[in-house]
Amino acid sequence: MSQEKNSSSTEEKHKWFPLESNPDLVNDYVRKLGYSQVYEFVDVFSTEEWALEMIAQPVQAVLLLYPLTDVQNAHQDPPESIVKESTDIWFIRQRIGNACGTIALLHALLNGPAELFVPNSWLAQFAQVTQTMSPIERAQQLEQDQQIAQHHDQAASSEQNATTRGSLDDDIITHFVALIAVNGNLYELDGRKEGPVCHGPCQNLLVDACALVQKFMARDPNEVRFTIMPLAPKES
Protein backbone atom coordinates (compact mmCIF):
# COMPACT_ATOMS: atom_id res chain seq x y z
CA MET A 1 0.00 0.00 0.00
CA SER A 2 1.24 3.50 -0.69
CA GLN A 3 0.85 6.80 1.04
CA GLU A 4 3.21 9.75 0.97
CA LYS A 5 4.43 11.19 4.23
CA ASN A 6 5.99 14.19 2.52
CA SER A 7 3.93 16.08 -0.04
CA SER A 8 5.38 17.15 -3.36
CA SER A 9 6.49 20.68 -4.03
CA THR A 10 3.33 21.20 -6.05
CA GLU A 11 0.15 22.19 -4.25
CA GLU A 12 -2.08 19.28 -3.19
CA LYS A 13 -5.76 20.18 -3.35
CA HIS A 14 -7.15 16.64 -3.18
CA LYS A 15 -6.35 13.44 -1.35
CA TRP A 16 -7.14 9.86 -2.35
CA PHE A 17 -6.93 6.55 -0.52
CA PRO A 18 -3.64 4.79 -1.35
CA LEU A 19 -3.33 1.85 -3.73
CA GLU A 20 -1.96 -1.49 -2.63
CA SER A 21 0.96 -3.12 -4.46
CA ASN A 22 -1.08 -6.06 -5.72
CA PRO A 23 -0.81 -7.29 -9.33
CA ASP A 24 -4.35 -8.67 -9.49
CA LEU A 25 -5.81 -5.41 -8.20
CA VAL A 26 -3.61 -3.27 -10.46
CA ASN A 27 -4.41 -5.33 -13.54
CA ASP A 28 -8.12 -5.04 -12.88
CA TYR A 29 -7.69 -1.27 -12.45
CA VAL A 30 -5.80 -0.72 -15.72
CA ARG A 31 -8.27 -2.89 -17.65
CA LYS A 32 -11.07 -0.60 -16.49
CA LEU A 33 -9.03 2.39 -17.68
CA GLY A 34 -8.74 0.80 -21.12
CA TYR A 35 -5.39 -1.00 -21.23
CA SER A 36 -4.88 -4.07 -23.42
CA GLN A 37 -4.89 -7.56 -21.96
CA VAL A 38 -1.76 -8.41 -23.95
CA TYR A 39 0.41 -7.22 -21.02
CA GLU A 40 -0.06 -7.58 -17.28
CA PHE A 41 1.69 -6.55 -14.07
CA VAL A 42 3.37 -9.39 -12.19
CA ASP A 43 5.37 -9.77 -9.00
CA VAL A 44 9.14 -10.13 -8.92
CA PHE A 45 10.23 -11.98 -5.80
CA SER A 46 13.92 -11.11 -5.96
CA THR A 47 16.34 -8.94 -7.91
CA GLU A 48 18.54 -12.01 -8.46
CA GLU A 49 18.98 -13.53 -11.92
CA TRP A 50 16.89 -16.65 -11.23
CA ALA A 51 13.84 -14.53 -10.38
CA LEU A 52 14.20 -12.22 -13.37
CA GLU A 53 14.43 -15.21 -15.72
CA MET A 54 10.89 -16.16 -14.66
CA ILE A 55 9.45 -12.93 -16.14
CA ALA A 56 8.30 -12.90 -19.76
CA GLN A 57 10.02 -10.42 -22.07
CA PRO A 58 10.00 -7.74 -23.33
CA VAL A 59 8.96 -5.74 -20.25
CA GLN A 60 7.21 -2.43 -20.96
CA ALA A 61 7.77 -0.77 -17.56
CA VAL A 62 8.58 -1.57 -13.93
CA LEU A 63 6.72 -0.26 -10.88
CA LEU A 64 8.68 0.11 -7.65
CA LEU A 65 7.11 0.62 -4.23
CA TYR A 66 9.63 1.69 -1.60
CA PRO A 67 9.58 3.13 1.93
CA LEU A 68 9.94 6.89 2.36
CA THR A 69 12.38 6.63 5.24
CA ASP A 70 14.67 9.45 6.33
CA VAL A 71 17.50 7.83 4.36
CA GLN A 72 15.47 7.68 1.15
CA ASN A 73 14.15 11.22 1.59
CA ALA A 74 17.66 12.55 2.15
CA HIS A 75 18.90 11.13 -1.16
CA GLN A 76 19.47 13.81 -3.81
CA ASP A 77 19.58 13.08 -7.53
CA PRO A 78 22.40 14.82 -9.41
CA PRO A 79 20.89 17.98 -10.93
CA GLU A 80 22.18 17.04 -14.38
CA SER A 81 20.24 13.75 -14.26
CA ILE A 82 16.85 15.51 -14.04
CA VAL A 83 15.20 16.07 -17.42
CA LYS A 84 13.25 19.34 -17.21
CA GLU A 85 11.76 19.17 -20.71
CA SER A 86 11.30 16.24 -23.08
CA THR A 87 8.99 15.47 -25.98
CA ASP A 88 9.97 11.79 -25.81
CA ILE A 89 8.84 11.12 -22.23
CA TRP A 90 5.26 11.54 -20.98
CA PHE A 91 5.55 12.96 -17.46
CA ILE A 92 2.99 14.26 -14.96
CA ARG A 93 3.48 15.99 -11.62
CA GLN A 94 1.68 14.66 -8.54
CA ARG A 95 -0.69 17.17 -6.96
CA ILE A 96 -3.15 14.70 -5.39
CA GLY A 97 -2.22 13.25 -2.02
CA ASN A 98 -1.72 9.44 -1.97
CA ALA A 99 -2.12 9.28 -5.77
CA CYS A 100 1.40 7.96 -6.40
CA GLY A 101 0.05 4.55 -7.43
CA THR A 102 -2.10 6.01 -10.19
CA ILE A 103 0.64 8.46 -11.18
CA ALA A 104 3.12 5.58 -11.52
CA LEU A 105 0.62 3.59 -13.58
CA LEU A 106 0.06 6.51 -15.93
CA HIS A 107 3.81 6.90 -16.34
CA ALA A 108 4.14 3.18 -17.09
CA LEU A 109 1.24 2.97 -19.56
CA LEU A 110 1.42 6.31 -21.37
CA ASN A 111 5.11 5.88 -22.21
CA GLY A 112 4.27 2.62 -23.98
CA PRO A 113 2.68 1.88 -27.37
CA ALA A 114 -0.63 3.68 -27.94
CA GLU A 115 -1.97 0.62 -29.77
CA LEU A 116 -2.26 -1.06 -26.36
CA PHE A 117 -5.01 1.41 -25.42
CA VAL A 118 -8.60 0.36 -26.08
CA PRO A 119 -10.08 2.88 -28.58
CA ASN A 120 -12.25 5.57 -26.96
CA SER A 121 -11.37 4.32 -23.47
CA TRP A 122 -10.51 6.67 -20.61
CA LEU A 123 -6.82 5.91 -21.12
CA ALA A 124 -6.90 6.60 -24.87
CA GLN A 125 -8.80 9.86 -24.37
CA PHE A 126 -6.56 11.06 -21.53
CA ALA A 127 -3.46 10.30 -23.60
CA GLN A 128 -4.82 12.31 -26.51
CA VAL A 129 -6.03 15.27 -24.44
CA THR A 130 -2.76 15.61 -22.49
CA GLN A 131 -0.33 14.84 -25.31
CA THR A 132 0.97 18.40 -25.71
CA MET A 133 0.40 19.56 -22.12
CA SER A 134 3.11 20.39 -19.57
CA PRO A 135 3.50 18.12 -16.51
CA ILE A 136 1.62 20.65 -14.35
CA GLU A 137 -1.18 21.02 -16.90
CA ARG A 138 -1.54 17.23 -16.95
CA ALA A 139 -1.77 17.25 -13.15
CA GLN A 140 -4.51 19.87 -13.32
CA GLN A 141 -6.37 17.81 -15.91
CA LEU A 142 -6.18 14.75 -13.64
CA GLU A 143 -7.48 16.73 -10.66
CA GLN A 144 -10.58 17.70 -12.61
CA ASP A 145 -11.32 14.17 -13.83
CA GLN A 146 -14.02 12.51 -11.75
CA GLN A 147 -13.89 9.27 -13.71
CA ILE A 148 -10.28 8.48 -12.77
CA ALA A 149 -10.99 9.48 -9.16
CA GLN A 150 -13.83 6.93 -9.08
CA HIS A 151 -11.72 4.20 -10.67
CA HIS A 152 -8.89 4.86 -8.21
CA ASP A 153 -11.28 4.77 -5.25
CA GLN A 154 -12.79 1.48 -6.44
CA ALA A 155 -9.30 -0.03 -6.68
CA ALA A 156 -8.34 1.30 -3.24
CA SER A 157 -11.48 -0.21 -1.70
CA SER A 158 -11.46 -3.49 -3.69
CA GLU A 159 -11.93 -6.79 -1.89
CA GLN A 160 -8.69 -7.88 -3.57
CA ASN A 161 -6.76 -5.69 -1.11
CA ALA A 162 -4.86 -7.68 1.50
CA THR A 163 -5.38 -4.87 4.03
CA THR A 164 -8.14 -2.41 4.85
CA ARG A 165 -7.69 1.02 3.32
CA GLY A 166 -7.87 2.77 6.69
CA SER A 167 -8.14 6.55 6.95
CA LEU A 168 -7.07 9.28 4.55
CA ASP A 169 -4.85 10.57 7.35
CA ASP A 170 -2.99 7.30 7.92
CA ASP A 171 0.80 7.71 7.72
CA ILE A 172 2.10 4.66 5.81
CA ILE A 173 5.19 6.32 4.25
CA THR A 174 5.63 4.23 1.11
CA HIS A 175 5.75 5.50 -2.45
CA PHE A 176 5.32 4.24 -6.04
CA VAL A 177 7.56 5.23 -8.95
CA ALA A 178 7.76 3.95 -12.52
CA LEU A 179 10.95 2.85 -14.27
CA ILE A 180 10.98 2.97 -18.08
CA ALA A 181 13.44 2.81 -20.98
CA VAL A 182 13.40 5.56 -23.61
CA ASN A 183 15.95 5.99 -26.41
CA GLY A 184 18.35 3.53 -24.78
CA ASN A 185 18.32 5.13 -21.31
CA LEU A 186 16.72 4.13 -18.00
CA TYR A 187 14.42 6.71 -16.41
CA GLU A 188 12.81 6.98 -12.99
CA LEU A 189 9.43 8.76 -13.14
CA ASP A 190 8.33 10.19 -9.81
CA GLY A 191 5.53 12.78 -9.83
CA ARG A 192 7.01 14.50 -6.77
CA LYS A 193 10.12 15.44 -8.74
CA GLU A 194 10.63 18.20 -11.29
CA GLY A 195 11.07 15.79 -14.15
CA PRO A 196 12.21 12.30 -15.18
CA VAL A 197 15.52 11.19 -13.65
CA CYS A 198 17.98 9.60 -16.08
CA HIS A 199 19.94 6.69 -14.63
CA GLY A 200 22.12 6.03 -17.65
CA PRO A 201 22.19 3.49 -20.50
CA CYS A 202 19.65 0.67 -20.52
CA GLN A 203 20.08 -2.58 -22.43
CA ASN A 204 17.42 -4.70 -20.70
CA LEU A 205 14.73 -2.81 -18.81
CA LEU A 206 13.95 -5.47 -16.22
CA VAL A 207 17.60 -6.23 -15.45
CA ASP A 208 18.68 -2.59 -15.35
CA ALA A 209 15.60 -1.48 -13.38
CA CYS A 210 16.28 -4.14 -10.75
CA ALA A 211 19.92 -3.03 -10.56
CA LEU A 212 18.60 0.44 -9.74
CA VAL A 213 16.19 -1.04 -7.18
CA GLN A 214 19.20 -2.67 -5.51
CA LYS A 215 20.64 0.83 -5.01
CA PHE A 216 17.41 1.90 -3.29
CA MET A 217 17.64 -1.18 -1.08
CA ALA A 218 21.30 -0.58 -0.28
CA ARG A 219 20.40 2.79 1.26
CA ASP A 220 18.08 0.97 3.70
CA PRO A 221 19.60 -2.50 4.27
CA ASN A 222 17.27 -3.27 7.19
CA GLU A 223 14.10 -2.33 5.30
CA VAL A 224 11.83 -4.94 3.72
CA ARG A 225 9.05 -2.71 2.34
CA PHE A 226 10.09 -2.96 -1.31
CA THR A 227 7.93 -4.45 -4.05
CA ILE A 228 8.67 -4.70 -7.78
CA MET A 229 5.99 -5.15 -10.46
CA PRO A 230 7.06 -5.32 -14.11
CA LEU A 231 4.55 -4.88 -16.93
CA ALA A 232 5.23 -8.05 -18.89
CA PRO A 233 3.66 -9.97 -21.78
CA LYS A 234 0.71 -12.02 -20.58
CA GLU A 235 1.46 -15.71 -20.77
CA SER A 236 -1.31 -18.05 -21.88
Image (tube, rainbow, N blue to C red):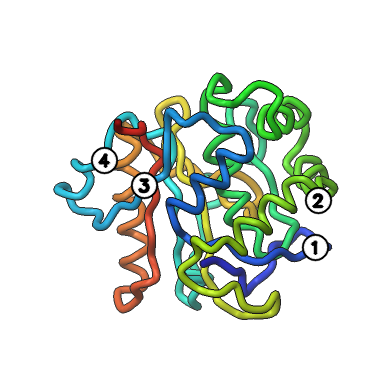
Q: In whole angstroms, how far apart are the C-alphas of marks 4 and 2?
A: 35 Å
Q: Which circle's residue, 4 or 1, is located before the other in the chain?
A: 1
The kind of secondary structure element at disc 1 is strand
Relative to residue 222, is residue 193 depicted above or below?
Answer: above
- Badge 1 is on which residue? 14
Picture coordinates of residue 225 (x, y %)? 39, 71
Q: Which circle's residue, 2 or 1, is located before the other in the chain?
A: 1
Q: In whole angstroms, how far apart are the C-alphas of marks 2 and 3?
A: 28 Å
- Badge 4 is on which residue? 55
Image quarter for residue 183? top left
How dense is the environment of label 1, judged by Cα within 10 Å: few (below 14), some, or many (20 and up)? few
Dots 2 and 1: beta carbons under 8 Å? yes
The amino acid pointed to by label 4 is Ile
Relative to residue 224, is residue 158 depicted above or below?
Answer: above
Q: In whole angstroms, how far apart are the C-alphas of marks 3 and 4?
A: 8 Å
Per the rendering, the mark at residue 42 is 3
Q: What residue is at 80 percent from the left and 61 percent from the top?
A: 11
Q: Nearer the viewer, residue 198 or 104?
A: 104
Q: In whole angstroms, how far apart are the C-alphas of marks 2 and 1?
A: 7 Å
Relative to residue 166, is residue 57 drawn left or right? left
Q: Which circle's residue, 2 or 3, is located before the other in the chain?
A: 3
The amino acid pointed to by label 1 is His
